[in-house]
Amino acid sequence: MVVAVITTISSIAIIRLEPYLQQSQATAGLDEAKTVLRQAREVAISQRRTIVVKFVVAQASTPCPAAANVYNCIELFQMVVSGTPPTATQAVNPFVTVPIENNIQFLTYSSEVDTPDGFGISGATNGVEFGGVGGGPTTGMEFQSDGTFTDGNGNLINGTVFLGAKSMPASAGAVTVMGGTGRIRAYHSTGSGWWN
């Protein structure tokens, strides 16, 4: 009888704690994205070089590890100057690859609204929109040595990375980057808006 009561109480506790566990995983994924973007900006400033940022969907053909519970990664590349006259080209391999773990993905939900920064959500391909382009500009996305965030042509761009667990809108989060300053801000969804 005692074992049956303990089992019942444990089952109820696990069921009630499941949403909190999922929310904790979503927060951890949001923190990973925010931290790696801040790291990219700090490296660009401290090393006085351009750092390229890529948001990658995990596949067997990419450096982003295609592993259980990993669907997306953020990769950072350095720009390398060589030749005469000097030209800058992106390094072949990333110097940092950060997997976004715990089933968290770059995505938006159908009922989701834009963040208070208002950098765009309508074209957020795979949850990423920078410079008004879903997935980001084809010319690239870069932190410059002064901390600004630009496309590959040096134009300032603002943008947002939306994250969450698939089929769980309550897990929604977003990280915004302000092009002119490189400021990075994280937001958590309230279901009808955002708080940071």
Image (cartoon, grey):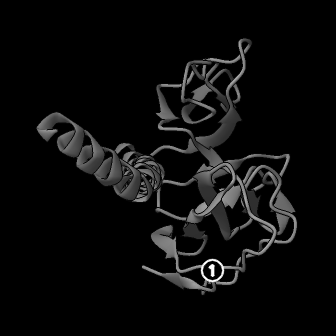
Image: 189 above or below 45? below
Percent x, y for residue 180? Answer: 58, 75
Residue at left offset 59%, top offset 55% = 164
Query: Looking at the figure, which quarter contains the N terminus?
Result: top left
Q: Compare residues 62 and 7 and report the one nearer the observer.
A: 7
Q: Compare residues 170 and 151 and report the one nearer the observer.
A: 170
In the visual, does 193 lie left or right of 56?
Answer: left
Which residue is denoted by mark 1 in the rendering?
115
In the visual, does 122 lie left or right of 144?
Answer: right
Specify the quadrant of the image occupied by residue 193. Answer: bottom right
**Residue extending farthest top:** 60
Q: Compare residues 152 and 34 and report the one nearer the observer.
A: 34
- Secondary structure state at the residue bearing disc 1: loop
Percent x, y for residue 41? Answer: 44, 54
Residue at left offset 55%, top offset 21% = 68
Percent x, y for residue 147? Answer: 47, 62
